[in-house]
Image: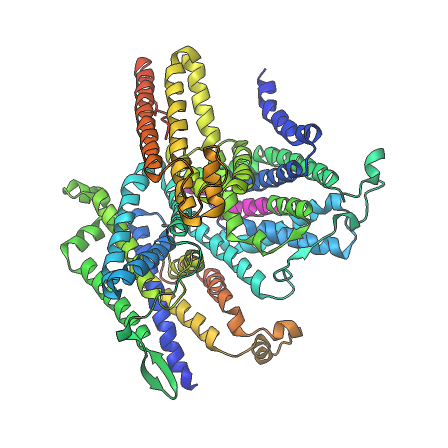
Amino acid sequence: MRKRRALAPWFVLIAFLALPPFIWPHSWLLAYLAQSATMIVFALSYNLLLGETGLLSFGHAAYAGLGALIAAHVFNTGGVPLALLPLVGGIGGALCGVLFGLIATRRSGTAFAMITLGLGELVVAAAWTLPGWFGGEAGVAIDRASGPRLAAAMPGSLAGWSFGPAREAYALIALWCVVAAVAMFALSRTPFMRVANAVRDNPVRAAAIGCYPARVRYGVVVLSAFFAGLAGTLGLIDIELVSTESVGMMRSGAVLIATVIGGTSAFFGPVIGALALTFVNVIVASVTRAWLFYLGLFFVVVVMVAPDGLAGFGMRHAARIAEYGWRRCRTAYLWSAAGMLLWLAAVVLAVQWAYAAQFGADEGAALGAIFGTRGGDAAAGSVPGLSAARLALLLCVLAVCAALATRRAIRAHADLAGHTRAVQRPGDAQ
Amino acid sequence: MQSFVINLLNGLSYGLLLFMLSAGLTLIFSMLGVLNFAHASFYMLGAYVGFSVAARAGFWSALVIAPLAVGLLGAALERWLLRCVRRHGHLPELLLTFGAAYLLGELVKLGWGLSPLSAPIPAVLDGPLFSLYGATFARYRAFMMAVSLAMLAALVAVLRVSKTGLIVRAALTHPQAVEALGHDVPRVFTGVFAAGTALAALAGVIGAPLFVIEPAMAESLGSIVFVVVVIGGLGSLSGALLASLLVGCVQTLAVASDVSLGDVASIAGAVLPPEWGALTLAQLAPLLPYLLLVAVLALRPRGLAGRRDDHA
């Protein structure tokens, strides 16, 4: 029973990656899934640093970008089949980790974070200025179908795959994603990672029992850089291009946000975070330009309410429901859900209104779409048939309702906690 | 050689601007133990608010109003957000300021749009102050140096002489003892955070006429400021001053120089491939602060004036 429960997330992950392409074979779905798979590996590799060793890095994209860059150059010179390219990228990333870790792991804590930020910016600045590195503005492109094939090693029908079509490339990416996730899971169970956990929790004690915290951190940085390079190469296979954006601060910030949102304490936390981030990045960003605002707001809310991320939050409340029984918890959670939805509605309305007022045309359409009308009055940022005063009134009503629901939820949670004499933080609906 | 003095002065003025930012950052770090990742965003916000105020009420009122407004916002951030996550340790605090940087960046885009703005230099400060061997030194840069130095003097005076400074310094090292003596340490924290962000905003108002005001300005300067505090040694005010001047001068001199990488290599006796040799130091200037960081950390992991890090 326990074994089955431990395996369940793996089945969900594999089903998520494998089933949709058979059910809805659209190209945008493949692109979305490929991005998700890349982000999953990237976030898991980041969690080796943040979750397992307690190292906050602001320059993780440097390993991924440089690994992908090395892989692209190796692939273009020929000799390496595409199916094995992620391994090349991983080794390239690990080499960068060997180099950068030497400088960064001399310090820990905040200083480590700032040094990685500096190193990340160094790579970005170098990518822009040094010739021949990133191919300037255009980046370095590869042609997936051009590499030598793995004819001998593959069974029957796979031998003919050129990886030219997006479907075949996606199958490769998904396969590598699962392999890398399994490898990282196995890694997180090794004695070395246990020592890394000890270094995270109490470096002084860890040093006293005879391990060198700096060396352990260095090892973790190299391992994490390996998987980051692998993730970067998966992205390279997906879009057939590595550019300066792939080492940039935006990408480093994205992986940090994904990992923290998902939760660093559980192995599958970063996977959840990666899926959430890719959703915002692809789906929400195609609807509104306010997606960065929503992402930042969501990140701040998660850090405030659940520092252990969505995974930790979910596990906490699942344990709570299991303990008290669903019947007793029902009121509290229904009020929480109501409050959450009302706040969401109020925030989305306010933000879309503000964006429509500032950016006009396209955002006006997004605001109008909320009310089911086509093409809002762009310049004024208002919706046809709904004046600014009415919109403001609607916002106020929504906010008041949300505040009331939140109060009820907090009270219900307090009752629940008081009733069973268990001291627990109310999972209110912020 | 003639323009070297002028370039050095320009570098010093840029370094002092960097110091205004890194001083606030260092102050907040040594007090709260958290590196305010949103510091550069407050600098940007200061520039934008200063721009708007200056357009209505003139440059001099902007110099006062913008830091006050941004400082209040900083105090609010500390009071209602940072204080709530403090019990979870420093990591969530740093992450919170990281998220706040995203939000502030979007708010600025929302409030002022995406297009770059250029703040005018006030008429009194426009024009050259003096010229030396044909190269001129702008009056505005002299003003910038004067404000930075005045700020430095005021900071030292407040921290060293006044009673408030005494409490702040004591709360730095012995927060429990200060609390036991009846001082409200959390309020001191809020005050320090507000002062730090106000300094950043002041730097924004002063720096705005020299640079373009745009939503990307926080990222472009922010990473340099973080590099400066690490080079100087985290938590050391004198180290921050030293590192700011160093980075400011190195970067400005590199931009102004017309030496190419090939020339530098030929002095060392090495020969570079032609496309590398053609690169000028001016093109490499954005790289220099980070290379300096690597060099300093390789030689002295705790930074120029940092204390020994016991956790390393």
| Main SS of residues in magenta | helix
* Residue drawn where x is 66% and y is 75% of the image: B274
Q: Is residue A149 above or below residue B295?
A: above
Residue B31 in the image: x percent, y percent? 28, 50
Q: Left or right of A369: which side holds A329?
A: left
Q: In the orientation shown, which residue stands out farthest toward the bottom?
A: B133
Q: Is residue B307 above or below residue B73?
A: below
In reply to whether residue B165 is colored magenta, the answer given is no
Where, quadrant-wise, is the C terminus of chain A in this rendering? top left
Residue A331 in the image: x percent, y percent? 37, 15
Residue A347 in the image: x percent, y percent? 39, 36
State the image quarter where residue B240 is shown: bottom left
* Residue drawn where x is 35% and y is 76% of the image: B9
* Colour scheme shown: rainbow
Q: Is residue A231 visible?
A: yes
Give whichever of B150, A288 is nearer the camera: A288
In reply to whether residue A224 is colored magenta, the answer given is yes
Q: Is residue A53 visible?
A: no
* Residue drawn where x is 60% and y is 54% of the image: A96
Q: Is residue B177 above or below residue A395?
A: below
Specify start and end residues of the magenta stretch as a single range.
A202-226
Give whichever of B231, B174 is nearer the camera: B231
Residue B68 in the image: x percent, y percent? 24, 54
